[in-house]
C-alpha cells in the first residue's frame, strides 16, 4: 500500500484544482506534473496519475459520496473516497479520518440505479447520449469510463511488425495484437514510450487503434495526390505516408501552425518524405481546385468518443459548443470538397459517437451535393471494441 505523503497529496490537489476549477486539460496537466517530479518512484507516479484521472472521471459520483462539491480545501475527501472505491478500504493517514466506510457504502448503494450519477456525467450530456443513441448509450457511457489503452502503430516506412515485436520482447514490453488494425500493438501496461529508442528512431507512432482505421478506410494507393485538411499534429497524415510508401504527395493543412510544426518534426523522425505542409488560405484553395484524388476531413468535434483518455471533457463540454461545432463540420465539407477531382474520394471522420456529428452530417451534405454518393460508413464503438469511439464515411464524387 502506498503511503500518501504530504507532497503527493499536495501535488494531486494542485493538479485537480487546475483541471476541475481552472479548466486545464487533464493529459497536459498530468504530463507536466510527472515531468516536474522525476524523482518519484514508478509506484508513486502510477498512483498520482491514476488518482487524478479517476477523480476527474468520477467527479460527480465522488461529490455524491462525500456530499460536497470539489474544492482545494476538501480534495483530501475525494482522494480518500477514490482510494476506497478502488481498493475497498480507506487510507490510514489522519487526513482521511472524516470519512466513514459505512456512510460511503450506504450512499454508493443508493445510486446503483442512477447511472447518470453512478457513471458520473452531467445531466445534459447523459440525456443527450440517451436521445442520440437510445438503449446503446448506457453501455457506451460505462465503456467511456474505462482507462484508455496504450496503442502503437508500426511505422512500415522504417520497421516491420515482426521487428518491433522482437524489440519489445527483448525489453519485456508485453503487448497484444488486434484483428482491427494490422499494424497495431496494444501494450498491456502504461509506460513512457516517448523516450524509447525505437520511438526516437521512428519505428512506431503512439496512436489508438480506432484512429489507425481511418487512413486505410480511404483506400488510397501509392502515387496519389491526397489532401489532409484538418491534419493537426499529423497522426493520420503519417499513416497515409506509410500506406503510400512515400510515393505521390500528401498536402497537410490546419489552422494551427503550432500543430503543423509538430507534424514537421514527426515526419522527419518517421522518414515520411512525401508530406507537404501548407498554409490554409483561400488562395491555396482556389489554386488547387479539382487537383486531388482523395481528401480527408478529420473534423473537429465534441470528442465524446475519446472521453476515456480525456475525461475532463465531460465537465468542460457544453451544449452550446456541440451546437456550434456541428455548424463548423458542415462548413468544412463545403469549404474543402472543391479540392477533389471528378471521381475522387472524400473521407469525413470524427472522434464523436453522436449521430448529429456523424451520420446526420453526411446525410445533410449529400442532400446539398447530389454529385457525391455514399460509398461506405463505419462506426467504432468503445463498448464493443474497447478502443476510442470513431466515425468515418467514404464518399465518392461522381465522374
Image (cartoon, helix red, strand yellow):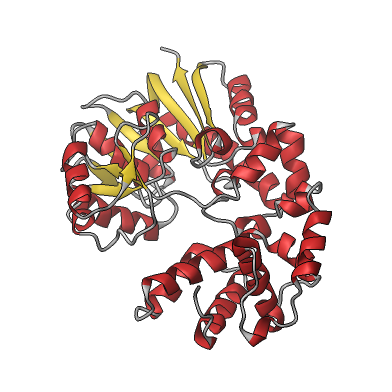
Relative to 238, 317 lies left or right = right
Whole-percent x, y for residue 304 in the image: 60, 45
Q: With respect to residue 250, does 188 lie above or below? A: below
Q: Position of residue 224 (x, y in %)?
A: 26, 27
Compared to residue 95, the image places residue 227 above or below, namely above
Vertical order, 16 against 169 (above or below):
below
Total marks drawn?
A: 0
Image coordinates of residue 273 in percent, x first then y, are: 18, 43
**Image quarter (top left, top right, bottom left or bottom right) of the C terminus:** top left
Q: Quadrant of residue 366?
A: top right
Residue 295, how many percent across, how many down? 40, 31
Question: Of 233 and 87, which appears nearest the observer?
Answer: 87
Of residues 6 and 207, the one drawn nearer to the viewer in this rendering? 6
Q: Is residue 280 above or below residue 378?
A: below
In front of the other: 4 or 16: 4
Q: Residue at x 45, y 18 (%)?
A: 397
**Residue 183 in the figure: left or right of residue 377:** left
Q: Residue at x 70, y 84 (%)?
A: 73
| Residue 219 visible in the shown view | yes
366 on left or right of 274: right
Location of residue 61 by image quarter: bottom right
For the residue pair 283 and 19, the one nearer the viewer reads as 19
Residue at image point 23% right, 42% down: 155
Q: Is residue 150 left or right of residue 306?
A: left
Farthest residue, direction top: 399
State whether residue 272 appears in this view.
no
Amino acid at each position: 500500500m502506498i503511503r500518501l505523503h504530504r507532497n503527493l497529496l499536495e501535488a494531486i490537489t494542485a493538479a485537480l484544482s487546475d483541471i476541475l476549477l481552472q479548466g486545464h486539460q487533464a493529459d497536459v496537466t498530468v504530463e507536466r506534473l510527472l515531468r516536474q517530479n522525476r524523482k518519484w518512484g514508478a509506484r508513486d507516479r502510477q498512483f498520482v496519475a491514476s488518482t487524478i484521472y479517476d477523480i476527474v472521471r468520477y467527479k460527480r459520483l465522488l461529490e455524491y459520496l462525500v456530499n460536497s462539491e470539489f474544492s482545494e480545501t476538501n480534495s483530501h475527501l475525494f482522494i480518500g473516497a477514490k482510494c476506497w472505491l478502488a481498493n475497498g478500504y480507506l487510507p490510514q493517514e489522519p487526513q482521511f479520518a472524516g470519512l466513514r466506510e459505512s456512510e460511503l457504502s450506504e450512499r454508493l448503494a443508493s445510486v446503483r440505479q442512477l447511472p447518470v450519477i453512478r457513471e458520473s456525467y452531467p445531466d445534459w450530456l447523459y440525456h443527450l447520449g440517451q436521445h442520440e443513441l437510445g438503449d446503446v448509450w448506457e453501455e457506451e457511457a460505462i465503456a467511456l469510463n474505462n482507462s484508455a489503452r496504450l496503442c502503437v502503430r508500426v511505422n512500415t516506412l522504417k520497421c516491420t511488425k515482426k521487428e518491433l515485436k522482437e524489440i519489445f520482447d527483448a525489453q519485456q514490453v508485453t503487448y497484444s495484437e488486434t484483428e482491427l488494425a494490422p499494424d497495431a500493438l496494444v501494450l498491456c501496461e502504461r509506460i513512457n514510450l516517448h523516450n524509447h529508442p525505437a520511438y526516437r528512431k521512428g519505428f512506431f507512432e503512439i496512436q489508438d487503434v480506432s484512429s489507425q482505421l481511418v487512413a486505410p478506410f480511404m483506400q488510397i494507393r501509392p502515387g496519389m495526390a491526397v489532401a489532409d485538411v484538418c491534419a493537426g499534429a499529423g497522426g493520420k497524415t503519417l499513416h497515409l505516408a506509410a500506406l503510400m510508401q512515400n510515393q505521390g504527395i500528401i498536402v497537410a493543412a490546419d489552422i494551427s501552425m503550432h500543430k503543423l510544426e509538430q507534424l514537421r518534426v514527426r515526419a522527419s523522425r518517421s522518414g515520411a518524405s512525401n508530406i507537404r505542409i501548407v498554409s490554409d488560405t483561400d488562395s491555396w484553395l482556389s489554386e488547387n481546385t479539382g487537383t486531388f484524388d482523395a481528401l480527408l476531413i478529420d473534423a473537429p468535434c465534441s470528442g465524446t468518443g475519446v472521453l476515456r483518455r480525456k475525461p475532463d471533457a465531460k465537465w468542460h463540454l457544453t451544449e452550446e459548443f456541440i451546437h456550434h461545432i456541428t455548424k463548423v463540420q458542415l462548413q468544412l465539407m463545403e469549404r474543402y470538397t472543391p479540392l477533389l477531382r471528378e471521381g475522387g474520394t472524400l473521407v469525413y471522420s470524427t472522434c464523436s459517437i453522436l449521430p448529429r456529428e456523424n451520420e446526420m452530417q453526411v446525410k445533410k451534405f449529400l442532400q446539398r451535393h447530389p454529385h457525391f454518393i455514399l460509398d461506405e460508413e463505419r462506426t467504432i464503438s468503445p463498448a464493443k471494441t474497447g478502443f476510442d469511439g470513431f466515425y468515418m464515411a467514404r464518399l465518392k464524387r461522381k465522374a
